[in-house]
Amino acid sequence: MKLDLQKFYKASNPIKTLVVSNPEDRQYYIDFSAVRGAKIIEELGRTIARLSPETPTCQLFTGHIGCGKSTELLRLKAELEKQDFHVVYFESSQSLDMADVDVTDILLAVAREVSKSLEDIKINLKPGYFQNLFKEITDLLMTPMELSEVELSAGIAKITAKTKDSPKLRSQLRQYLEPRTNGILEAINNELLKPAKDKLKEKGKAGLVVIVDNLDRVDNSLKPSGYYQPEYLFVERGEQLNQLNCHVIYTIPLVLVFSNALGRLTNRFGVDPKVLPMVPVQVRDGADFEQGITLLQKMIMVRAFPGVSWEQSQNPNFNLITQVFDSPDTLERICRVSGGHLRNLLMLLFRCLQREDPPISRNCVESVIKQRCNELTLAITADEWQLLREVAQHKSFRGDEKYELLLRSMFVFEYRDEDGSWFDINPILMEAKEFQL
């Protein structure tokens, strides 16, 4: 069996999200739930399909950016579709400016994506409220937009496109929409979601599920209200996000889980956020966690040789590992230093492939690790190094702002075991001479 370099390179792209319903992507999928401490996707799906199929549910999902949330949510979409739910999945970052998001932006994005998805299956709804709203917005923005007869999704898309690149127009639109938030919510529920669910029922569907991905990427910027954006959206305005008349899953910024706002967040939504932790490469006391390391190695090898089992990869008669790396130790080294952060691991591998053809040498891996370590350390201040040493020593984390920055910058990773959360620093930083001081 020979390694196809171009296919391997393409499969290792760190910014590609695996779409599990696609057979080619499915062969690269590794289920890490056994080592992550919980079957989170199963819990989200069970809440919708088993516990409350008829009554709308609203759930929150979070984790480090790049730890595999989108892949897991697309797996959930595929699972729910097998159970006859109509699932609308979208990446909010495609249409919203993550530096400046408001509740009406999210609600209109949901309305657009739901109506677009329904139009694709020949369900066309024309809520009267929005026809009037479009006309008023056209007058307000004084921009010629033909919105009178367009589909709902196209109308919202035109407005979004017009305001996305112009803070001035966006601010005008916000001031106009803000007092109408409850009216917009009511129209979405009564004129879009309710009739949509009725029509879907006629087609034999079990219900409607909306998955809003990438909202965890909203900037931690200060809003005019005095709240940071994540807290403003999900705590101060969470009640409105919780009122959509269908099953909804929002991804939320991880910092909210470690902030003083967590209690209020849980009250607003009536549920605890589900956290997707890192894949552990060691346990709390620093001992190796072989099961986690093995799954990470498997993740790389399955991208090199799709459909080949880990047992076959290890078989010395096939020499599969040594077609990719100069030795099994080099494969293990790159997996350990990733800290179980899936995108980091693929990024290190990707950089190695950009430098040399497989088998990738140990020198190449060490050089890439060194470069990444250097990039990360440039941003770390002396007092942050002290905080990192404390995290590494105590494996715990305090919810104040200084620590939150370490989490957001991915200098600190969160892991789970049967005793709950524990923390450690990104293993690449342990290589830095500043950490040793």
Image: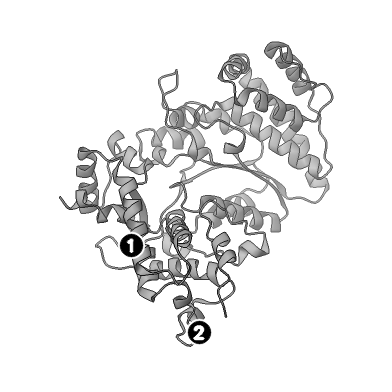
Residue 198 in sight: no
Q: Residue 252, percent across and down?
A: 49, 39
Label 1: state its secondary structure: helix
Which quarter of the picture shows residue 173?
top right
User: What residue is drawn where x is 62% and y is 64%?
Assistant: 26
Q: Find the residue positioned furthest to the left.
A: 437
- Locate the N terminus and report the quarter of the image it occupies: bottom right
Residue at numbered disc 1: 366
Q: Disc 2 marks which amino acid?
A: Phe
Does 134 appear above or below 73?
Answer: above
Cβ atoms at labels 2 and 1 below 8 Å apart = no
Query: Which residue is the extreme one toward the front?
Result: 356
* Image quarter of residue 126: top right
- Identify which residue, 78 or 168, lies in the foreground: 168
What residue is shown with label 2? 318
Residue 258 % position (x, y):
36, 40
In this orientation, which residue lies closer to the viewer: 218 or 200?
218
Query: What amino acid does circle 1 point to?
Result: Glu
Does 224 sit above or below residue 155? above
Left or right, residue 178 beside residue 204: left
Observer-nearest residue: 327 or 402?
327
